[in-house]
Image: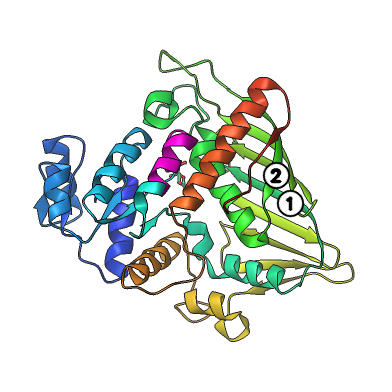
Amino acid sequence: MVGGGFMARTHAHAARAAGAEVAAILSSAPDRTAQAAAELAVPHAAASLDELIDRVDVVHVCSPNRWHLEQSLAVLAAGTHVVCEKPLATTAADASRLVEAAGPLVATVPFVYRFHPMAREARARVAAGGIGRLLTLRGSYLQDWLLGPGEQNWRVDPVAGGASRAFGDIGSHLVDLLEFVTGDRITRIAARTQTAHPERAGAEVRTEDAVAVVVETASDAIGSLLVSQVAAGRKNALTIEVSGSEGAVAFDQEHPDELWLGGRDASSVVSRDAAILSADAARLSVVPSGHPMGYLDAFTGFARDTYAAIRGERPDGLPRFADGARAAVLTEAVLAAAAEDRWIDIPTEGL
Ligand code: SOE
């Protein structure tokens, strides 16, 4: 593990639940590394990235965004597999460098919401024609942990976190999940950004708190997205609704064991039950119905599939560096669309 915060803790839990041994950890300074090693019961506190790489089969990069490029490049250069947190890099160009550097190594990005069984079920139903011709997409990802002007975090700083904050941090999950579930591609974007507080804790804020986006897709669907880290009362409210000529599906990350099926005459909510799920959703449904699954289980599913890929298997729907780079392209386009007050075309070739 590289990192010592919430994400390193989450990755360590997922790695262990997926059968790995967390052999070594490196945080931002020796005392923090020692503290993280003690808290997470990791046997070795590494003194450097090179030393850490030497001891492991795969490195999980959970450091602040500014380090993702350099650290992931170093891991890959050593011929070691890597999991790198999103946003994969702070620019689309850097993300693309990482895709190239990965070559045949397994290099994945934890777009973990793909690993909720009911998100997979939504994807399977859309792919099977269950909603007919795709017409509209609606998505939002709302949080409130940065609502107060006194709230501060490294993500607010464009040097540490990247030029986009709310979209890079959580909008990236939203576009990944929408494209994953629909199998469609966003081709054009118009956007507005908002910075709620010009200053936080005495420092000027140069990253956005909220973003509103209008999208068009390759299949001529249209959609709207709202992303905010200042949405009072919303904690981690990632919701998507995908509507077509024959029906609709909606998924809510805070109620991940359910899927809403919309119909003109009748709508219903189906609960997770492996007996009625598509094969890919059932594969990820690892406890019987009525026993709730959640965020940590999705993370574990991601880690399990990453390690399966390292063993040479080809698990369906594993988010790789190319998916991280795709989100980085969309993030940059959102910022450009807002700053230049115009529609931006999104390249889809090579996907
Ligand atoms: C904070 O906004 C955060 O931890 C994100 O960085 C994660 O990607 C998201 O899954 C939950 O919220």
Q: Pointer 2: what residue?
A: 187
Q: Are marks 2 and 1 in contact (CB under 8 Å)?
A: yes
Residue at (20% x, 41% y) in the render: 27
Q: CA distance from mark 2 to mark 1?
A: 6 Å
> Residue 107: x, y in percent?
37, 56
Please tell me which of labels 2 and 1 falls first in the chain.
Answer: 2
Residue 15 position within the rendered picture, expressed as x and y whole percent measured from the top left: 29, 63
**How far from the left and from the top, in percent, is residue 50?**
14, 45
- Furthest residue toward bottom: 275
Amino acid found under the numbered disc labelled 2: Thr
Q: Which mark is residue 351?
A: none
Q: Which residues are magenta?
A: 88-99
Quadrant of residue 208 within the rendered picture: top right
- The single residue placed furthest to the right in the displayed view is 265
Does the magenta-highlighted stretch encompass residue 188? no
Secondary-structure class at tag 1: loop
Which residue is labeled 1 in the image?
Answer: 218
State how the image is colored: rainbow
As for residue 95 lying within the magenta part, the answer is: yes
Of 274 and 81, nearer the camera is: 81
Answer with the quadrant where ligand 1 appears in the image. top left
Say which residue appears at 67% left-offset and 52% top-offset.
185
Confirm or reject: label 2 Cβ below 8 Å from ligand 1.
no
Indicate the amino acid at tag 1. Ala
Instruction: Report the front residue among 278 and 291.
Output: 278
Rendered location of residue 131, percent (x, y): 78, 67
State left or right for residue 149 relative to residue 108. Answer: right
In this orientation, does residue 87 appear?
A: no
Q: In the structure shown, which secondary structural element does the residue marked by tag 2 occupy?
A: strand
